[in-house]
Amino acid sequence: MKFPKPIPVLEIARKTGATLLGDESLLATGINEIHKVVPGDITFVDNRKYFRKSLESAASIIFLNEKTECPPGKALLLCDNPFEAYDSLVREHRPFRPLSASISESASIHPSSVVEPGAVIGHQVVIGRNCYIQANAYIGDHTHIGNHVIIQAGAIIGTDAFYFQKNEDGFKKWRSGGRVVIEDHVDIGAGCTINKGVSGDTVIGEGSKLDCQVHVGHGAVIGKHCLLAGQVGVGGKAILEDNVVLYGQVGVAARVRIGKGAMVSAKSGVSKDLEGGKAYFGIPAEEIRVRQRELAALRQLPGFLKKMEEPE
């Protein structure tokens, strides 16, 4: 998530009640989770085993709950509950704003695009040229849609991330400060659901096609010219490189990367990174040629066992 304008780190320390260590001249330009930070970003860490990763990341400003040496060029914000401080900033810049009309006054829709009756367009949504938004689609706040995009009836785009912080009382919901970004020439099928990122973007790459009832989790990145068949589920922060094909009911675990040009057969489960340019199937998904040998061996197993039981 990017701020409308840079915020001095001294102001952030004052607002959150944090003790500032390090460079007091820094300006924060955004806020993000540790795996997506860029220079100028704020992030947080509340577990010592992740301290080093956070301190060595590209983040310029880090909320943390233990005093430690500040790396050069960074600022540390020491506080009791880094998550609460982080979440409070997201809530400040992404406040809850209920809609009072089907199409928000702050939405920007190109005159050449068609929005059918019953579609709901949220605050700060951008819709480019020659798009077609069918009836009863929902486009949530801050979603950015490119040109020549088709979103079929009942698609739900830009819903909250499924992301919770576990505490003694159960689970605390994170404020979703990210967006959904849909690039040019994308087709979104009927009944698809696409979550916005926690603080980064969920991206559907140029030319990609999603069949009906596909789910894309928070912060996932779908590359260019990918094809996702019906009932595919892509977990949060997963990455599909360009030209990936997932057939019906494939499930992709969170944070998995599937390489360019890979194909995964129907009903497979992807639980680990897959190399590009290969075909996979099974649960867990493996290369087809490997699975075929395994299945061939299994078919011979009854005969093998029967032979073992026969007297010599």
Image (spheres, helix red, strand yellow):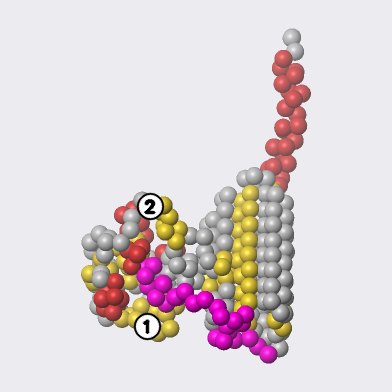
The residue at the far bottom in this view is 111
Amino acid at circle 1: Pro
Residue 107 among those drawn in magenta: yes
Where residue 188 is drawn, which disc sits there? none
Q: Is residue 60 left or right of residue 154?
A: left
Q: What is the chief secondary structure element of the magenta stretch? A: loop
SS class, disc 1: strand
Q: Report the span colored magenta.
A: 86-111
Task: Tell me what residue is drawn at x 72 percent, y 51 percent.
Answer: 266
Q: Residues within 10 Å of mark 2 (few under 14, many from 20)?
A: few
The percent coordinates of residue 231 (x first, y second) are 69, 57
- In-front residue for pair 53/81: 81
Tell which tag, 2 or 1, sits nearer the viewer. Answer: 2
Q: Is residue 311 left or right of residue 53?
A: right
Amino acid at circle 2: Asp
Task: Tell me what residue is drawn at x 63 percent, y 68 percent.
Answer: 156
Where 215 sits versus 32, above or below? above
Residue 46 among those drawn in magenta: no
Task: Tell me what residue is drawn at x 42 percent, y 59 percent.
Answer: 172
Q: Is residue 271 left or right of residue 33?
A: right
Where 270 sits versus 203, above or below? above
* Quadrant showing the C terminus: top right
Marks 2 and 1 close (CB-CB < 8 Å):
no
Alpha-carbon distance for marks 2 and 1? 35 Å
- Residue at numbered disc 1: 6
Where residue 169 is drawn, which disc sits there? 2
Location of residue 26 by image quarter: bottom left
Question: Earlier along the polypeptide chain: callout 2 or callout 1?
Answer: 1
